[in-house]
Image (spheres, grey):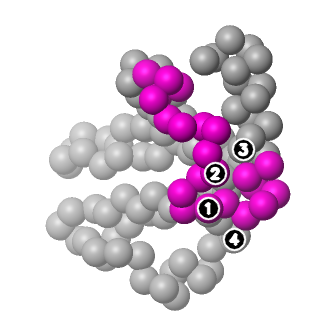
Amino acid sequence: MSLPDWRAERLPPYDYLACVCRWPRRNRFEVYSWRLRDRLPQIMIPLVDPDPDVPLDLQAAFEHVYAVGRYAKRVRYNEPCDPPLAAQDQGWATEQITAFRAAGGA
């Protein structure tokens, strides 16, 4: 099930969404939204009752996969993003890449 348009329209401005559905009631879900420049959120992952939800830190997971997957060497950071970012977001992304490389990231 995807997020209904009416629900997405009620959210504050966002670039990305994560939607966690709860089985067996697939219409019961949590929505996490964030902007490109925000830290990735921690989301709650449901387990089988009676086990409580477990937190998943998306930022930590992304950073781990990025490091072990050697994406710093594999992604073509000298090319614009595809799909393209807004001009000011592309400028921000370029600054982030430059700072990462200057710090010895790749």
Query: Magenta region: which residues?
Result: 70-91
Q: Which residue is mark 3?
A: 93
**16 sits to left or right of 36:** left
Q: Judge whether residue 10 can be spotted in this image.
A: yes
Q: Which quarter of the rendered picture does the C terminus lie within?
A: top right
Q: Which residue is mark 1?
A: 84
Q: Is the C-beta separation of discs 1 and 2 under 8 Å?
A: yes
Q: Earlier in the sequence, mark 3 or mark 4?
A: 4
Q: In the orientation shown, which residue stands out farthest toward the front?
A: 79
Residue 13 position by quadrant: bottom right
Q: Earlier in the sequence, mark 4 or mark 2?
A: 4
Report x, y in % for residue 29. Answer: 38, 66
Residue at the (73%, 52%) spot, across then down:
90
Q: In the orientation shown, which residue stands out farthest toward the top?
A: 104
Q: Which quarter of the rendered picture does the N terminus lie within?
A: bottom left
| Cα distance between the residues tagged 3 and 4 | 22 Å
Residue at the (79%, 37%) spot, across then down:
95
> What secondary structure is found at the residue carrying circle 2?
loop
The answer to whether residue 27 is above or below residue 59 is below
